[in-house]
Image (tube, rainbow, N blue to C red):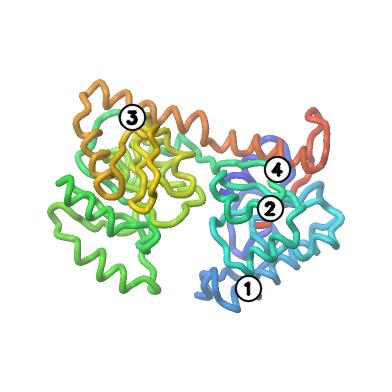
Amino acid sequence: MVRDLALGLKKRGHQVTLFCAAGSKVSVDTFDSLDFSLKDKKIPMFGSCESVFYSFQAAAKALKEVDGKFDIIHSHMDFFPLPFTPFLKTPMVTTIHGAWFSDGARGIFNAYKNEPFVSLSDATRKNLASLNYVATIYNGINVSRFNFSDQAGEYLLFLGRFVPDKGADLAIKIAKRAQVPLLLAGTTHDADNDYFQGKIMKGVDEKIIRFVGPIYGKRKNDLLKNALALIFPVRWQEPFGLVMVEAMACGIPVIAFNRGSVSEVIRDGVTGYVIQNKEQKTKNKKQKIQKRGVEGMVEGVREIEKLSNLEMKKLRKNCRQHIEKNFTIEKMVESYEKVYQKVLRLEPEKSIEKSAIVP
């Protein structure tokens, strides 16, 4: 997302500098705020003392370099640069990429609540409701990279990390009850190996349930466009859910639990189905499917299965058009331009010449 934003701003005539780890390759000016990537050093991105230290170090180095030299600073580092804002001459806007933060992290955000913030979805604001939000801006994709198909596929697809929050084990239950083949695609992590081996691999039977592992590029495109539906049975409050957007860009309807951003991304009954969770006690009478939990997801699969060829083509066309209208890089970049103007209190016809992006 940060790379696409930087390139999109450059395309619209802005001078952009991206502050990033050494070795990052992108066609804008860059500055190494870290001499290495945390991934290369096998340092966890979150939760370790090392990651916190290097994040603050990167923020300090970047802000020292940019202050007073740019029109605006756009931070994607959550709370790490915020303690430096009282000393900055250049205004800074922060996009919050997470959904839920610890009490300690919320305390840091709230200490700087009057700074301008952007949320990835309206749902993400609930955990940090007191902040000064200037906009909600959805992540955008390059739709042309995703091949559209109006033909119904014969399998369900789960695509994501194999961690409990993403609910791959629930996808297995849904597929087995619906008796529709499921492909499990995504990445594994050492910290969640017990879950992966015990809940995922034990469910793989190579008949109904198949494991395909990480997928990228053309293979990812092909698996998406040839699927019947994407299953998105998340257990956590999803901040955005880019895979839903990628699936719909290929024409694939999404069946998902109503957590976090899901009801903002999916048009219920038009581009898929939004299903209430078992623990949600109140019913949403406006939702197309009233059953909840796994049974509701199974009914969503059956509703899509029974569509006529003409109805299927319409559904898949709806998915593509929904993404083209609401989730493109161009729309995202234009929305951030408006935020920059708002933060700088410039007139709409004036332009921003130089911006710094700190991911």
Q: How crowded is mark 3: few (under 14 residues within 10 Å), some or many (20 or more)?
A: many
Q: Quadrant of residue 15?
A: top right
Query: Which numbered disc flags the more N-terminal residue, 2 or 3?
Result: 2
Amino acid at dot 1: Val
Q: Can residue 32 be seen in this view?
A: no
Residue 295 pos. (x, y %): 24, 46
Q: Which of marks 4 and 3 is in front?
A: 4
Q: What residue type is labelled 4?
A: Val
Q: Name the residue under label 1.
A: 52
The residue under the point 24% across, 33% down is 303
Q: Which amino acid does label 2 sit on?
A: Ser
Counting the numbered discs, the total is 4
Mark 3, residue position: 316
Give the mark toward the camera: 1 or 2.
Answer: 2
SS at badge 4: strand
Q: Circle 4 sits on which residue?
A: 134
Asked if the residues shown at circle 2 and circle 3 are in contact, with their CB atoms under 8 angstroms apart, the answer is no
Q: At which x and y percent is residue 198?
A: 25, 70
- Amino acid type of the residue tagged 3 in the rendering: Arg
Residue identifier under label 2: 130
Q: Which residue lies furthest to the top in this view?
A: 310
Q: Looking at the image, is 86 positioned above or below residue 276?
A: below
The quadrant in which residue 106 appears is bottom right
Whole-angstrom CA distance, mark 1 to mark 3, is 43 Å
Element marked by disc 1: helix
